[in-house]
Image (cartoon, grey):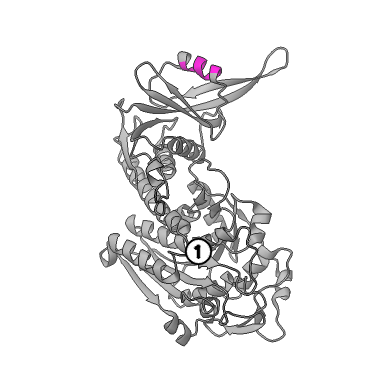
Amino acid sequence: MSTIRLSDNSTKDSILVLGLSFSKKNNKEKNQQVNLHIEPGDAKVNIKLLSAQLRDLGATGKSDEVIKIPTEKSTLIVFTGLGETSNNYSHEVLRRAAGAASRALHGNASATFALPAFDSETVCAVAEGAALGAYTFDEFRGSTKIERKAPLKNINVLTSLAKRPEVKVGVARAALIAQYTFLARDLINTPPSHLTPDSFTKKISAVLKEAGGTASGLKITILNEKQLKSRGFGGITAVGQGSANPPRLLHISYTPKKSLKKLAFVGKGITFDSGGLALKPALGMEAMKSDMSGAAAVCAATFIIAALKLPVTIETWAPLAENMISDTATRPSDIITIFGGKTVEVLNPDAEGRLVLADAMVKAQESKSLDVLVDVATLTGAQVVALGTRTSAVMTNNEPMREIFLEAATHSGEAFWPMPLPQELRASLDSPVADLANIGERMGGMLVAGLFLKDFVREDLPWLHLDIAGPAYNEGDCHGYTPVGGTGIAVRSLVTLAEKLEFVK
């Protein structure tokens, strides 16, 4: 984990990170030219000399471009692409640019970031992006671990605002965001041989203790497979009964000294999804270790909210199970009873996430005076088809709450898109033998899954359903501050939502 420092003077770092942008201009012959613009923030550099070197190197200034230029003074100057020139770069542009540079500097001990950030929020965005980019996951490497380059140990942000209290507070928040986003990423990247429902709870218990435990307002309870069965958690039990690694229900509560709002977070925690008796194809099944990304996100967000001491009570639930094949696995056409009494005909054992979520969502609603319920899940392949691998979906029964969330997501830099819950699709979930079936109309499968969950939410309770199936696990190239593998998507949006809700009447 990197240390973030602020400085309003030149540092002794041998690496200086600057911004690089481009603008397009038409000349008299109507040929379009591209002009490069060095964006040095509060750093003093020889722009004329560096511009000539950049042109010779064929620099473009586009996002994710990182160019390194050594200087005579043994200083390495690193240019990170900001895209098209602007007088006011967005927080997310700065986050991604700082993150791309940070990733490119693995193997170095320290670097100073001087990007065009001239107010407290943009300075903090640079710090956050640089910290998020300084991530590696090498826990399971053996002989090759020594060959791996370690991420930056020290991130120095050069800014004339370094002494402002709000900047110091914002940078401390950025460090917490990175710390617990890394927790989520680590959990997602951990192989199912080492991350089972039981070991997940043990890891979270250890983190909770390190975070201060009851002294920080945090408390944890865990239900084992026998307790789940005896207390009527039919969804979690049915999904987990085919595995040698039995299911768990993890509950974290954060109770501040003064509480203005009360939120419930529910995160899907399928530690590995084989599809059960609806076995998935072998190609791509290895990524199903990420099917617990929702559980990782809600746990990480809860720890950040507690560390920030926000005046918002959080009840977090992580239903954990391994969806496997055996003689005890749930069969197509089996009927199960969800916590609270509704029955579900399991037509497809691979539509298991909604079953464990239903149990936990009903349980979460037993909490008194709940203001909003949010579930987070890698729920459907249809989400990826509809929105791709970088944009998540949000569905709701309450449009004003959705708008508050979308504002929070935009501010945090995470891409979410509003999707409907068309009532005409609900009929496809009707079952001739149970209260409802776990699958319905194939077209619009993401929306059908949302409608299934809606059946388990009180009409008067604002509810948000976040389907993060694509963005939760990056199987492509690194980009910005995003590594290959687990991303930790939704962590920042949940924290920002909690921050915004404390001011909502």
Question: Does 94 appear above or below 243?
Answer: above
Residue positioned most to the left: 215
In the rendered image, residue 470, in percent from the top left (x then y), is placed at 59, 55
The one nearer the camera, 356 or 114, is 356
**Range shown magenta:** 50-56
Amino acid type of the residue tagged 1 in the rendering? Met
Question: For mark 1, what is the residue?
Answer: 292
Residue positioned most to the top: 28
Name the image quarter holding residue 330. bottom right
Q: Does any portion of residue 409 appear in the rendered image?
A: yes
Question: Does 189 appear above or below 359?
Answer: above
In the rendered image, residue 296, in percent from the top left (x then y), is placed at 45, 61
In percent of the image, x 44 and y 68: which residue is there? 196
In the rendered image, residue 7, in percent from the top left (x then y), is placed at 30, 32
In percent of the image, x 61 and y 51: which residue is there? 389
The one nearer the camera, 464 or 219, is 219
Majority secondary structure of magenta residues: helix
The one nearer the camera, 46 or 351, is 351
Residue positioned most to the front: 143
> Around disc 1, counting alpha carbons within 10 Å, would you say few (fewer than 14), some (14 to 19), or many (20 or more)?
many
In the image, taking residue 224 as reference, residue 257 lies left or right, namely left
Residue 481 magenta-highlighted: no
Question: Does 93 appear above or below 312?
Answer: above
In percent of the image, x 43 and y 64: which residue is there? 194
In the rendered image, residue 235, in percent from the top left (x then y), is placed at 54, 78
In the image, taking residue 237 as reference, residue 333 lies left or right, namely right
